[in-house]
Amino acid sequence: MARKNSNDIRPGQGEDVAARRTPMREFSRSLPMSLLRAREAVMRQFRPSLRNHGLTEQQWRILRALTAVDEIEVTELARMAFLLGPSLSRILRDLEGRALIERKAAENDARRAVVSISAKGLKLIEAVAPTSETIYAEITRRFGARKLAELQEMLGALEASLAGMGSSDDAEVEADE
Amino acid sequence: MARKNSNDIRPGQGEDVAARRTPMREFSRSLPMSLLRAREAVMRQFRPSLRNHGLTEQQWRILRALTAVDEIEVTELARMAFLLGPSLSRILRDLEGRALIERKAAENDARRAVVSISAKGLKLIEAVAPTSETIYAEITRRFGARKLAELQEMLGALEASLAGMGSSDDAEVEADE
DNA sequence: GGGAGATGATTAACATGTTAAGTGAATTCC
DNA sequence: GGAATTCACTTAACATGTTAATCATCTCCC
């Protein structure tokens, strides 16, 4: 299986192809790729279980976030579940249709919507949570609790260190807002 | 500043919600969320530049991967750029339409397609690369080269430690679908 | 050499990511 | 107090993620 093609051109160090180009970091070792691969490795563990309960990763994130509060406005929920507004709008529409959440208008501001998890939603959470916890525990066991804590700390530090980094574009950088 | 309700679960009015549930890890500190946020913080830096050149993140990944080889089969490219087949199919169709890549059938196997970057594609890469390198350098400077290396190492280790973790589902796990 | 099954790639269908535009309600400012 | 602006979503439009199904080979085996 997986036999490399005849003249395997493997991006070895020093190919004629690479001769006339900018060297660049080895592609698969870029930070974004490392983060992507790591996250995928983790999520791959959870997805099947969620799927069995009819939930996507994002839907689960939302319900999960809702269990931590009594009720919450949409914008704040977006921040908490780390979703963009448009995605959240769609998902809330769906979850409301399935009666997993409830939505009402804010009392003093008709623009704002207030969301909360329903009894049915809570029930679903309770059905999924044990498996999720088991998986998370197994991940922790495999990787090591200490290393896991370290990793999380570094990830937070990375995020923090990039916080104020203005995206100064190369060409046209018009009208700073 | 986002005041996060660290441990206090907000009893809420009249709801014994938190009382009968599994406590669960504080949501925003779960590993998937940490990875997602970190990756987003990084990609946020690159996206504007790519966008200015008419490229999405994934299109960039593909072109980038193609510069490391002379030519490559689609499946192998998918593995290299960490994309699923269907996504890659769509993107290749688009990139071919823009003449940024070239595609031909493999000589000995009509099922396989062989892809390579075009001169135009190379030119585009060369136009974008300097900015990307600058951004990457700035990220490295801010976070620290040593810490960056450590982080990448831990991410790789995480991925490795989860490698053979069968997704043992909870309820119904039947052999077929 | 022909049929069953495996394989590489694409298409289909649905959900989300991402940016821009739209809508209705609150705020500001004159 | 009303036009202009801001605000909190929501829609729209397009690209990708994800799983399943399809299609065209290719291989194996009788």
Image (cartoon, coloured by chain):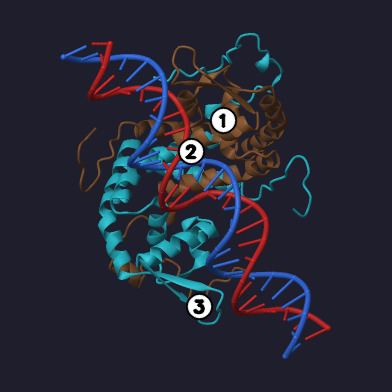
Chain colours: A brown, B cyan, C blue, D red
Dot 3 amino acid type: Ala
Q: Is residue A146 above or below residue B176?
A: above
What whole-number distance in Å separates the C-alpha atoms at marks 1 and 2? Answer: 15 Å
Q: Which residue is mark 3?
A: B106
| Residue B115, picture quadrant | bottom left
Q: Which residue is mark 2?
A: B36
What whole-number distance in Å separates the C-alpha atoms at marks 3 and 1? Answer: 46 Å
Dot 2 amino acid type: Leu
Q: Chain of mark 2?
A: B
Residue A172 lies left or right of residue A67; in this view the side is left
Disc nearer the start of the sequence (3/2) = 2
The x and y percentages for residue C2 are 75, 86
What whole-number distance in Å separates the C-alpha atoms at marks 3 and 2? Answer: 38 Å
Which sits in the foreground, B10 or B24?
Answer: B10
Q: Residue furthest top?
A: B14
Q: Is residue B155 above or below residue A155?
A: below
Q: Residue at x 75, y 40 (%)?
A: B170
Is label 3 in a helix, a strand or a loop?
loop
Residue B94 lies left or right of residue A96; in this view the side is left
Q: Chain of mark 3?
A: B
**Mark 2 Cα within 10 Å, few/some/many (few <14, many 20+)?**
some
Which sits in the foreground, C9 or B108?
Answer: C9
**Mark 1 Cα within 10 Å, few/some/many (few <14, many 20+)?**
many
Dot 1 amino acid type: Ile
Which mark is drawn over residue B15? none
The x and y percentages for residue B162 are 61, 46
Disc 1, disc 2: CB below 8 Å? no
Q: Is residue A175 above or below residue A9?
A: above
